[in-house]
Amino acid sequence: MAKKSLRNNFLLISLILSILYLIGLSFLKYYTNGLSIKNYSFRYLGNIVNIVFSGLLFIGILVANFKEKNFKPAQKKFIVFLLVIANFLLVLVYLSSEFFVYDQSSYLFSFQIKKVYTGFFYILSFLIIIYVVLYIWGAIFFIEKLHELRTIVRTIFVVMLLIIVSIFYVWDVKKYSYKRDDFVQYEIAMIPGAAVWSKNKPSPIFEGRIRKAFEMYQEKRLKRIIVTGGNAPGEVSEAEAAFILLTRLGVPNKDLIVENKSSTTTEQIKYLKSLEDSLANKKILIVSDSFHLPRIMQICKFFHVKAEAIASDYKLLFSKTLYYRFREAIALLLFWLFAI
């Protein structure tokens, strides 16, 4: 009787926790970005990945319930414990976004400390879910020694596989090439901010974005330009550095919009989202580097911002290209999974 009770409790508790995790993650992805859950899309790739892992977890729990001999009582308790921790970490994400107080001027690895903590809670929770999925399915198919350690190795492999998929996605940039023969006029173009060097000079990457937008403005393909980006340490904001260069090149102030509060690409797309009423049914363009645009367009898709993208002409050394694409691949994967 006690055995049957343990079996039923394991099934019920673990299924409830797995469902709560998917609901909690889906809710937080939108809520922390100021969006209603009504914006949720089953076609968005990041949501599909979340659903796939939750589905594997859900099905695995059901199968495990019938593969009674493969799971010791201690293993079942271990699974429930990990699922409780994964859900608790999502609670910390919510508390971090709503109630925890952080020093806004404090940064770690160029990221606001609040984003670092929130990202840490998200990542750890998802790693636990991957581990639990592999732990359950591993026990279903294998009876092996050191199962817990072997599952860690499998978890690392799955994470690497996800990163590789993201790298391939970031590498697909041909569609963002500038087509001089196709004359399309845009109401507005946004230039995402980048590093500012000494004497208020945009970095070469940033200047490449600015000059591409200016070239299109000269060709009458753009009516107005939005420059974005917050303060750079010891210098003017990224947006102001772009504004200074564009005015020197001859763009009148009336055709420039300065947004100097954002510190991330996501915040810059949110700003575009805030303009949707005034830009309804008007063509929007985003000008950035080819390695940056795949992630930008995924962020636009998440926020339901209809925009097109053009890559700048700035060419990177191959070693730099590898570095930036790998960094973007990680950033894209984090956005897919957690919208951060």
Image (cartoon, grey):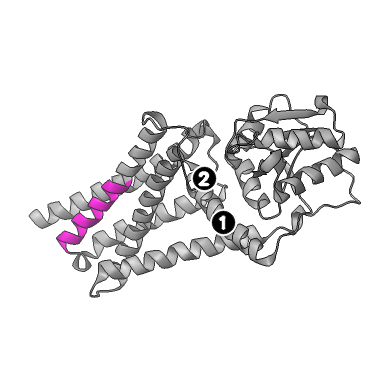
* Residues packed near mark 2 inside 10 Å, few (<14), some (14 to 19) or many (20 plus): few
Tell whether position 107 is magenta. no
Percent coordinates x, y for residue 329 in the rendering: 57, 57
Disc sitting over residue 327 in the figure: 1
Q: Is residue 148 left or right of residue 294?
A: left
Residue at 82% over, 24% down: 254
Residue at image position (71%, 36%) is: 241
Mark 1 residue crowding within 10 angstroms, few (<14) / some (14–19) / many (20+): some
Residue of label 2: 110
Provide the major secondary structure of the magenta segment. Answer: helix
Mark 1 and mark 2 residues within 8 Å of each other at the beta carbon: no
Please give left or right for residue 197 compared with residue 109 in the image. right
| Rendering quarter of residue 218 | top right
Disc 1 on helix, strand or loop?
A: helix
Q: Amino acid at mark 2?
A: Ser
Q: Secondary structure at mark 2?
A: loop
The span picked out in magenta is 72-86
Which of label 1 and label 2 is nearer to you?
Answer: 2
Q: Number of marks in the image?
A: 2
- Residue 165, horizontal then vertical, whole percent: 55, 62
Is residue 337 among the parts visible in the rendering? Answer: yes
